[in-house]
Amino acid sequence: MNAMIDISKLNAWFDDNHVLKDVDISVPANGSFGLVGESGSGKSTVLRTVTGLVDDWEGNILVNNKELTGTRDKAFYRLAQMVFQDPFGSLHPRHTIDRILTEPVNIHGLGNSDARVVEALNQVGLDNSFRFRYPHQLSGGQRQRVAIARALILEPKILLLDEPTSALDVSIQAEVLNLLTRLRHDLGLTYIMVSHDLAVVAHMCDDIAIMNHGRIVERATATQLAEGKLDHPYSQQLYKAAAGYDRAVVDSFVDWD
Amino acid sequence: MSNEPLLSVKNLAITFSTPKGPVNAVRGVSFDLGRERLGIVGESGSGKSQTGRAILGLTAPNGKITADQMQFHDLDLRNLTPRAWRKVRGARISMIMQDPKYSLNPVMTIGDQIIEAYREHHKVNAKEAKRRAIEMLESVKIRDPERVFNAYPHEVSGGMGQRVMIAMMLIPDPEILIADEPTSALDVTVQLQVMAILDDLVRERGMALVFISHDLQLVSSFCDRVLVMYQGLVVEEIRASELDQAKHPYTKGLLNCLPKMDGNHAELPVLTREASWAEA
Ligand SMILES: Nc1ncnc2c1ncn2[C@@H]1O[C@H](COP(=O)(O)OP(=O)(O)O)[C@@H](O)[C@H]1O
Ligand SMILES: Nc1ncnc2c1ncn2[C@@H]1O[C@H](COP(=O)(O)OP(=O)(O)O)[C@@H](O)[C@H]1O
Ligand SMILES: [Mg+2]
Ligand SMILES: [Mg+2]
């Protein structure tokens, strides 16, 4: 067992709504796993269950060979951090970037916060002039860099990335995706990345799972995805849709709800 | 598909006065619109929405519009009275926006809203209005029109909500439809289905469509012609089928920085902006 993350038979519920059904995901250390599917298919819930934000779940989640039960302890959050889609919503509007980054350092009693803040900003390509600004004084891409810096400041081994570039312009998306690729290599990070965009996960991930209504309906490597070697009709439909507008293709779509 | 222009815009400029000084949102945009699908593409803040809103007389009060020409048939849109605008806006030129939830009344059923809108334009009794409303829901390919008719806006999905908006917008039979990121919040398959509905309207009713979007790839697979905007300027106008021959470095940069499904994890080319692109 040398998987960094090993999820098996994960099921989750919101009241009577059974939103994850026997989800299995295994990610080797330093691997990058992509979860793709349409909205409501359960992608975020997978990440949120791992980070302890979902109460009602069954199955096994092993992170760094340790089984997760009950609430997550501090050690877990030093190991795994989550980055959300909306960098505005996830950064406190009235706190400076310095305070946003210092807070987790203090909570975890790591000390040396000054040097850590400088280092984390540096890692995401922001210079010191950003330190005492507020989130609203930054562009969308800069805010997402701050959110990534906040995740990195605890020196985690795992980043759980929930649509980290969906709210950004494509030119800024390219910069943030490049940053994430570089960080994974330089820091030996392990990723699970959620996206509704097939091309984004094909570009960022080695292994990809396609979700529909809480189930993984297909798995593919980036190469198989590139070649369109998909078996399940739902994944084929997503693949065709990613190619742009084609009247005949649209007419062939079936509803999956 | 384009022929005689319905709308001719020349040198449109929009400047907002703000406490921090003037914001030149649109700086000399010109285009003719025929019975075609015209795309307007660019990054956020490039002036796409403001261009669309000016055509509908919806510029915010702190904005000042100048243009050498804004001609819609025999109407000069530059100096319409509010009363004259009401005869154009929604009736002859219509707009659909990104989020239908903001445009629909949350406490009224979808059916009642369609009927109300229909009876503003047509003198019919309640029974006939309902029949027409159901027909309209069918025309936007809603399979279960009775259910949607009786539903409240929050009870339908985003894609369904957007179809309802299109159905309502069609009531007065407009000649021009301005669609401002109408599908950006939708899943890609639903997005394409909504686009197919718009596509049919252009073909079957001879309507002109202005499709505003940040997604150059998508727009050029759909439209006949694309205007690429950068900082309030149209930096390139290109036939959608000739996108691969784009000349402006901004247009090329936007295409190159997209992740491709080629299994290649190499660095993505990033856009290096040149000051000269923003020079009028
Ligand atoms: N906090 C919540 N309370 C109730 N239902 C939720 C909650 N979060 C998600 N859901 C439901 O769970 C399902 C999966 O949602 P989600 O994991 O957010 O999907 P995705 O990220 O793929 O769009 C959806 O039906 C959604 O409505
Ligand atoms: N009422 C306003 N006052 C000041 N600036 C505005 C106003 N409305 C829009 N703007 C500015 O105009 C520019 C173009 O906006 P917009 O057309 O909405 O861009 P896009 O639709 O391409 O994202 C932006 O810089 C925006 O901030
Ligand atoms: Mg999600
Ligand atoms: Mg806009």
Image (cartoon, rainbow, N blue to C red):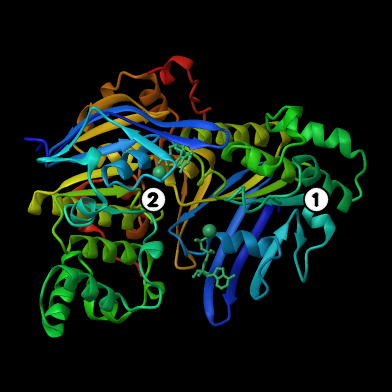
Q: Residue B51 location in percent, x, y?
A: 32, 38
Q: Give the chain of mark 1.
A: A
Q: Give the chain of mark 2.
A: B
Do labels 2 and 1 touch, CB within 8 Å?
Answer: no
Q: Residue furthest top?
A: B276
Residue nearer the viewer, B34 or A74 = B34
Mark 1 surroundings within 10 Å by alpha-carbon count, few (fewer than 14), some (14 through 19), many (20 or more): some
Q: Ligand 3 within 8 A of label 1's CB?
A: no
Residue nearer the viewer, A65 or A109 = A109
Residue A224 in view: no
Going by the numbered disc 1, the residue's amino acid type is: Arg
Residue A60 in view: yes
Q: Report the residue marked by disc 1.
A: A78
Q: Quadrant of the N terminus of chain B?
A: top left
Residue nearer the viewer, B270 or A87 = A87
Going by the numbered disc 2, the residue's amino acid type is: Ser
Helix, strand or loop status at disc 1? helix
Q: Is residue A113 left or right of B115 when viewed as pictured?
A: right
Write down the quadrant of residue B9 in the picture.
Answer: top left
The Cα–Cα distance between marks 2 and 1, rounded to whole angstroms, is 36 Å
Q: Report the residue marked by disc 2.
A: B184
Mark 2 surroundings within 10 Å by alpha-carbon count, few (fewer than 14), some (14 through 19), many (20 or more): some
Q: How many marks?
A: 2
